[in-house]
Image (spheres, rainbow, N blue to C red):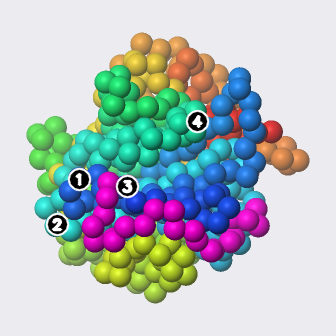
Amino acid sequence: MEKLLRFPIVLLFLSSFFLLQNVTAFKNQDGSEEWGYVQVRPKAHMFWWRYKSPYRVEDSSKPWPIILWLQGGPGASGIGIGNFEEVGPLDTSLKPRNSTWLLKGDLLFVDNPVGTGYSFVEDEKLFVKTDVEAATDLTTLLIKLFNKDENLQKSPLYIVAESYGGKFAVTLGLSALKAIEDKKLKLTLGGVALGDSWISPEDFVLSWGPLLKDVSRLDDNGLEKSNSIAQRIKKQLEDGKFNDATDSWGELENEISISSNNVDFYNFLVDAGSGSDISAMAVGLLKERSRKRYSKYLTSLRTRSSSPGGDDALGTLLNGVIKKKLKIIPENVTWGGQSNEVFTYLEADFMKPRIDEVDQLLAKGVNVTIYNGQVDLICATKGTEAWVRKLKWEGLKSFLGKDRTPLYCGSNKSTKGFFKSYKNLQFYWILGAGHFVPNDQPCVSLQMIASIIQSPAT
């Protein structure tokens, strides 16, 4: 792992940044890391960072996989959060992470959509307005990275998403498949994994009140208020009033915060900002993405932790030593954990479901994995199970009828989770984890990802 700590850079392809070619790529000295920008549309630049695993096993019967990590938000930075807070080789102190997913495969992080993290646009009109537009940009990035690299083409690509990233993942999965069928994209799609994913906003908001009442975080009065707003959201979605539904979502989160005395939406067992560093960071994400449009609902949020990209450790790291290491980030681009602009431009799509896209992936034979943290609230297991039951996939009845298998990890034989599978649909219930499953339960998460990507590593 020590070689991953090296910072010297060899510039393999150098162009004036302001005259960007379609792909600008750089590698570190030993070639274990590669990063750069892809111009996915004129004046729209997407930043990517790939790590090659030092644990690669060459096995012709089981090719070495690569994981594309998609963060949520929308507008949250995978380069920062997923990489340094969850599954990348180094933590925010630049110390090796013992549970890095590099143990099982290569990693590709992308700041998606454009305008997120290090990615940027030269004209605000270039922000994406739909999940499908975001998927189109991501497909362009994959074409630019994979089509000219035969070594990359040998590795099956697994799209692994968290939170809103799940909506990007299923739309990208379909877009990538289409590009592969049209012979525009040279890669093998290994599967799609949806971690605590915002696939059906209606089912999640309807789950919040009953779940919090069951765990004594809401009383009858709080439940009544929450359910009332949730039912309004349901009606707005039925009527196609998606912007209004997004407004009501902000109102509902505020009402739940007040009635529960600031429950953490990323771990309902604790108060907001009182848990781990990543939990405090998540509160900042919620605050930042909501601040502009939903300021009238944020009284209860203003006392919470500082937001990423500001004066917190992650923002300091990404705007300091990491930006200096990468060398190609424009001076006028400041990394932020959550882009308000990205969220605002996607507000009409924010509350739209993507259950149909999951159905389409399953029907096409794509391996789809769903995993959920037990104590997550924002994308609660209760809501995830509700939208899964709405699938029209022909194997659903058989899947629901299957018994779960308990999961263990390491020498501790206590139950760490449960697993169920039928044909190309898998579901993992991860106990003791909130919204950020790899951070909360690293051991069983590593075991899980090895199974999902069929890693040849032991």
Q: Nearer the viewer, mark 3 or mark 1?
A: 3
Looking at the picture, tell me which residue is in the foreground, 299 or 28.
28
Determine which residue is flagged by label 1.
Answer: 41
Disc with the residue nearer the chain's start (3 vs 1): 3
Q: Which residues are magenta?
A: 1-23
The quadrant of the rendering that contains the C terminus is top right
**What's the mark number on residue 23?**
3
Residue 433 rendering spot, x and y as whole percentages: 61, 53
Nearest the viewer among 3 and 113 is: 3
Q: Residue 97's x, y, as percent? A: 71, 63
For marks 2 and 4, give the CA distance. Answer: 35 Å
Residue ranking furthest to the bottom: 311
State the SS at label 4.
loop
Measured in 3D between alpha carbons, the distance from the residue under mark 4 to the one under mark 3, in whole angstroms, is 20 Å
Residue at image x 45%, y 51%? 70
- Label 1 sits on a secondary structure element that is strand
Q: Are marks 2 and 1 in contact (CB under 8 Å)?
A: no
Q: Which mark is residue 155?
A: 4
Residue 19 is tagged as none
Question: Residue 56 in magenta?
Answer: no
Q: Amino acid at mark 4?
A: Ser
Residue 139, how many percent across, how many down? 34, 41
Q: Residue at x 52, y 51 (%)?
A: 108
SS label for mark 3: strand
Mark 2: which amino acid? Glu
Q: Which mark is residue 124?
A: 2
| Amino acid type at image mark 1 | Arg
Spatial CA span between label 2 and label 3 = 21 Å
The label nearer to you, 2 versus 4, is 4
